[in-house]
Image (spheres, grey):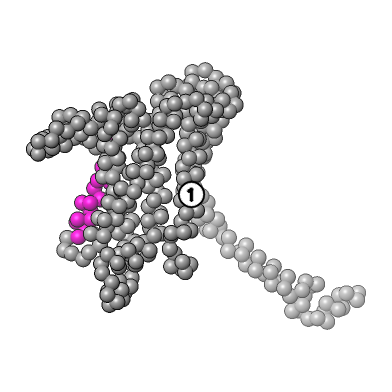
Amino acid sequence: MNATTHEAGARGPGAAGSHPPGRASAERTRGAGRRRWSPRRRSATFAGYLFLLPWFLGLFGLVLGPMLASAYLSFTEYDLFTDAQWVGLSNYTEIIGSDPEFRQSVGVTFTYVLASVPLRLLFALALAVVLNRTLRGMAFYRSVMYLPSLLGGSVGVAVLWRQLFGRDGAVNEFLGLFGIDGPNWIADPDYSLMTIIVLAVWQFGSPMIIFLAGLRNIPPEMGEAALVDGAGPLRRFLSITIPLLTPIIFFNVVMQTIVAFQAFTPSFIISNGTGGPVGSTLFYTLYLYQKAFTEFEMGYASALAWILVAIIAAVTAVAFLSSRRWVFYADEGR
C-alpha cells in the first residue's frame, strides 16, 4: 500500500477519493437529476414535443417562411409568372418617392386610424361603465353588447352596411321622416370614409369586454373613501377610475391601433375593391392587395407590406414611449 492510499484510508469513508465535499454534493445532485429522467418521463417529454409539432410547422411554414420570402421579394421584380429579378431598393424608392397612390392610401389609413380608434374606445368605455353595475339580467345585456364584435368584421355585415348607407338605404329613409334629403353616403367622397369609420366604431365589443374586466378589478373601497370625502361621480371617475384603468386603456389603444392599420374588408366590400370614390376609401391594405393580386406586382406589394410593418412598429414604439408619462402601474408606485 502506497502513501496516497494510506492517507485516503485515514480520512475515512466519508471522504472517499480526492473530491472536496462541495464537488461531491454537486455530483450527487446531477446524478439525482439524471435519475429523474426515467423512460416514462422521456416518453412524456417526447409526447409533449409531438403535440407542439403542428405549432412549429405553422410557425415556420406559415409565418416565418412567408415573411422571409416576402422580404426577399421586396427587393425583386416578380409577377408570379416569370422568375424574380433582383432590383435592389428600387421598389422602396419608387413607393416613397414617386407613388401618389401610396401617399393617398397612407393619408386615408391614418385618417381612419386617428378617427376610429379613439371613437371606438370611448364608446366601448362608456358602455363598459354602464354594464359595470349589479342588475338582474346584466350577463344577458353584456352578451348582447358583444354581438357586434362577432359580426362587425364579416363580409356579410359590410354588405349590409353598404345597403344601409346607400342612396335609398334605411339611413336616408329615416332622415326623410324629418324632411332631410340625405346624400349617397358611400358614393360621395365627403362621406364614404366616415361611413367606414362608423362601421369600425360599431365593432366595440372586444375593447368593451377588456374595459369591463378592468373596471371590476378596481377596489370599491377607493371610490367609497372618495365619496366620504365629498367627491362626486364625475370626480371619482376622473381621479380614481381613469388613473387605475390606464394600463387597460394603453393595452386597448395599442391593440386597436394595430388592428385599424390592417383594416381591409369594409373598404374592399363598400368600394367594390376600387378604393373609390376618388380614392377616398383607398386603405393601405387595399392598395397592397390591388398591387399584388390585380396588377400582379408581387415584389412591389411585398415592399408595401414591409413598409406597413415599419409604420406599425414605429407607431407602437411611440405608444410605449409615451406610456411612461400617462400610464399608472400601482405596483411601480407611479
Foreground residue, 84 or 35? 84
Q: Amino acid at mark 1?
A: Val
Residue under the image location 12 percent in, 38 percent down: 174
Q: Badge 1: how crowded within 10 Å, few (<14), some, or many (20+)?
A: few
Residue 302 in view here: no
Kindly state the secondary structure of the residue where label 1 is placed.
Answer: helix
Give the quarter of the image for residue 239.
bottom left
Foreground residue, 315 or 143? 315
Tell me, yes or no, whether the highlighted magenta stretch contains residue 313. no
Please provide the residue range marked out in magenta: 138-155
Residue under the image location 37 percent in, 64 percent down: 244
Q: Tally the marks.
A: 1
Residue 162 image offset from top left, x and y in percent? 23, 32
Q: In the visual, does 229 lie left or right of 295?
A: left
Determine which residue is flagged by label 1: 318
Residue 237 image offset from top left, x and y in percent? 30, 64
Residue 200 image offset from top left, x and y in percent? 30, 42
Q: Is residue 84 above or below residue 116?
A: above
| Quadrant location of the N terminus in the rendered image | bottom right
Q: Residue furthest top?
A: 82
Q: Residue furthest right?
A: 2
Foreground residue, 199 or 289? 199
Q: Main secondary structure of the magenta part?
A: helix
Residue under the image location 46 percent in, 56 percent down: 323
